[in-house]
Amino acid sequence: MIFKKIFNVFNAIIVMFLFITIYNMDPRKSAKQFQAPTGFLGRLFEIYHSRKNQPMVEWVISLLKLQPDDHVLEVGFGPGKAIKKLSQIVKDGKIAGVDVSEVMFKAACKRNKAAIKKGQIDLQNNDLHNVTYAENSFDKVLSIEVIYFFSDPVESLKYMWRIIKPNGYAAIYIAPKHELSQLKFANTGVFNLYTEQELNTMMEQAGFVNLRSYTKQISKYETGICILGQKSEKAG
Ligand SMILES: C[S@@+](CC[C@H](N)C(=O)[O-])C[C@H]1O[C@@H](n2cnc3c(N)ncnc32)[C@H](O)[C@@H]1O
C-alpha cells in the first residue's frame, strides 16, 4: 500500500516534469509528436503517455465489459499499455492493434513481447486508413485520444463500424474541446477538437446506435469523455 502511494507520487512528479517540457516546446512540433511520435523526442512522448494514460486506459476497458473470448482492436495503441491490459482479460480471444508511429509500435511490441510471440496479440505499424481488416470481425474496438488526428473522422468511424460485428461496440475516448483548447499545442491546426455532443453526432453519422456517453474526472487537470456506440444486430 505504502509502496503504491510512493510510486503514485513519484509517477505524478515525472508526468508533471514531462508535461512542462512538452508544453514549453514549439507548439506545432509538440502537436506533431502527439499525432505520431518520431525519433528521440518521440521516446519522450511515449514515456509521457505510458505514465499518464493508465487511468483512462483502465476506465475505457472497464466500460467495454469484455468477454474472455472477445476479438478486440485498439486504434492508435501508443505505448501498448491498453493492449497489455486487454491481453490479461481477453485470455481466449484475440487482440489486434494499429498505430502509425514506429516509436510507439516498437515500445508496444517490447511491452507485449510474450503475448505477441504466442499469437494472442497482432500489432501493425500502419495508418488505420491503410489496413484492411475483414468486415464484421471485431467484438469491440477502442481508441483513446486518437480521433483528433483524423482528417475525416466520420469516414474513419464508418470504417470502424464496418469491421465491428453486429451487436459489437466501439469506445471512443476524448478530452473535451473546452479543456484541450486551453493548451497551445492543441491550437496549431494539428488537433481537431470535439465536444461530447460533436463526438456523439459523428458516431451517429457513422452508423452507431444505442450511444452511451460517460464522463470521468481522470486527474485534477483532465476530464475524460468516452462514448460507447453499438453496431445494430440487423447491420452487417
Ligand atoms: C495521443 S496518442 C494516444 C496513444 C494511446 N492511445 C494512449 O492513450 O496512450 C495518439 C496515438 O495515435 C496514433 N495515431 C495517430 N493517427 C493515427 C492513424 N491515422 N492510424 C493509426 N494510429 C494513429 C499515434 O501514433 C499515437 O500513438
Image: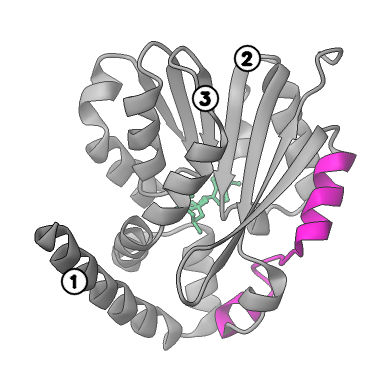
Check disc 3 and report the residue beneath it.
Answer: 72
SS of the residue under disc 1? helix
Q: Is residue 5 above or below residue 221?
A: above
Report the amino acid beneath label 2. Answer: Ser
Task: Give the alpha-carbon distance from disc 3 to disc 2, as whole Å.
Answer: 9 Å
> Among all residues in the image, which is located at the extreme bottom?
24
SS of the residue under disc 2? loop
Frontmost residue, 127 versus 113: 113
- At x 42%, y 49%, the residue is 78
- At x 75%, y 23%, the residue is 162
Frontmost residue, 159 versus 221: 221
Check disc 2 and report the residue beneath it.
Answer: 137
Contact flag, marks 1 and 2 (Cβ < 8 Å): no
Contact flag, marks 1 and 3 (Cβ < 8 Å): no
Task: Give the alpha-carbon distance from disc 1 to disc 2, as whole Å.
Answer: 41 Å
Report the amino acid beneath label 3. Answer: Val
Q: Which residues are magenta?
A: 184-205
Task: Give the alpha-carbon distance from disc 1 to disc 3, as whole Å.
Answer: 32 Å
Contact flag, marks 3 and 2 (Cβ < 8 Å): no
